[in-house]
Amino acid sequence: MTGTGNDIVSLGAINAARTNQYKFYSKILSDSEIPLYNEFNLAVIPFENFVWLLWSVKESAYKLLQRHEPALLFTPVKFVVKKLQIPENYAIVKFVANVEATGFENNSSINGLMSFGQHVLYSRSIIYRNLIVSVVSNHDSFENTCWGVKSIDDPEQENQSKEVRLFLLNRLKQIYGDFDFRIVKNPHGCPILLKETEETSIPVSLSHHENLIGYSFLKHD
Amino acid sequence: MTREEILSELKAVISPYTTNKEMLAGIDDQTDLIKDLKINSANLVDIIIDAEAKYDIEIDYDSADKMVNVGTCIDVISEKLKEKI
C-alpha cells in the first residue's frame, strides 16, 4: 500500500481560547499525546497550534488510509502520534503566498511517527505564522512526495475546489508534460487523477481551509 | 424531545459553521455535514462541543465519529438524552 494525504489548517480561522480547553482538545488528542508537547520541546509553539498540528497530521493520515478503506471513519483520538521531532532553533516563518516543493529537505519540518491500528505512518509538517501544512506517507522517505500550498483571493467553497485542482494540475504538467490530466472524485469522495479517461496510479490528495489550498502526490519515475 | 425538535435546534448549532444557509434551511436526515453543507472537517469538533453544551450531554468519540449526517447527529443526541433520564 502506498499513498499520500495532506491537510492545511488556517490558523486565522481557529478559536485559540476554545482549543486550549480540555473539553475541546481531548476530542482530538489521546491521553498519550498530551505529554508530547513538553517531551519533544514543542513549547516553542503555542499549545493551540500544537493541537492543530496533531489534527492536521491525523486528518492527513485519515485521507491516506480512507482511499484504501472507504468505510473508515475519522476518529482523531484513534490516530496516535508517537513521536514528533522538531529541529533545534525551530523558527516559525512567514508564508509567502505560494510554496511548492518535492520532499522536505529544504524546509524546516516537524517530523512525526504515528500509528492507526496496525498501520505505521510518517508525517512532515511546517508551521507558518498563519497556517499549518502536513503531509503523511507510509514511508519515512518523502523524496518522491510533491506538495504545495497557496493562498487564494476567494475562499468560497466552489472557488477553493476549482483553484486547488488547477494548482495541482499545473504542478503535474511541470513534471510530466502537457498531458490531458483531470481530477475527479471516486464514489467514496477520494480525489483520483485521470490521464485522458484512464485512472493513473499516482495517488493525489487535496486540502483547503479558508483562503488556503494545498495538494500532495507521489511522483513516479 | 422529538426528532423534529432536535432537527430544528440542530440547525442553530450547525449554522455558524456553514455558509450554505439555503441548504441548511432544508436539511433532512440524509444531509451530509461535509459534502452537502460544506462544513470544514476542522469545525466538526466545534459542532460536537456545541451540541454537548446545548443538551448537557457527553458525546464519546465512538458516538462522535458516527455524526456524519443530520440523521446520525439526531440519533446520537437522542440516545444521549435518553441515557440522562
Image: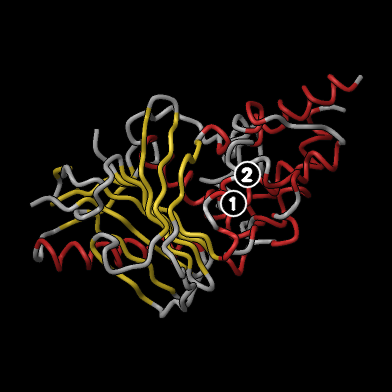
Q: What residue type is disc 1 on?
A: Tyr
Q: What residue type is disc 2 on?
A: Ile
Mark 1 → mark 2, Cα distance in angstroms: 6 Å
Q: Residues within 10 Å of mark 2 (few under 14, many from 20)?
A: some
Tell me which corner region of the image, top left, top right, bottom left or bottom right, holds residue A72.
top left
Could you tell whether A92 is left or right of A28 in the image? left
| Element type where label 2 sits in the image | loop
Which residue is denoted by mark 1 in the rendering?
A37
Could you tell whether B63 is left or right of A221 in the image? right
Q: In this view, does A91 lie above or below A204?
A: below
Numbered badge on residue A34: 2
- Residue A162, given in percent of the width and then of the height, sits at 37, 63
Numbered badge on residue B59: none
Of A142 and A37, which appears nearest the observer?
A37
Q: How crowded is mark 1: few (under 14 residues within 10 Å), some or many (20 or more)?
A: some
- Residue B85, given in percent of the width and then of the height, sits at 92, 19
Q: Do the residues labelled 1 and 2 touch (CB within 8 Å)?
A: yes
Tell me which corner region of the image, top left, top right, bottom left or bottom right, holds residue A68.
top left
Tell me which corner region of the image, top left, top right, bottom left or bottom right, holds residue A134.
bottom left
| Element type where label 1 sits in the image | helix
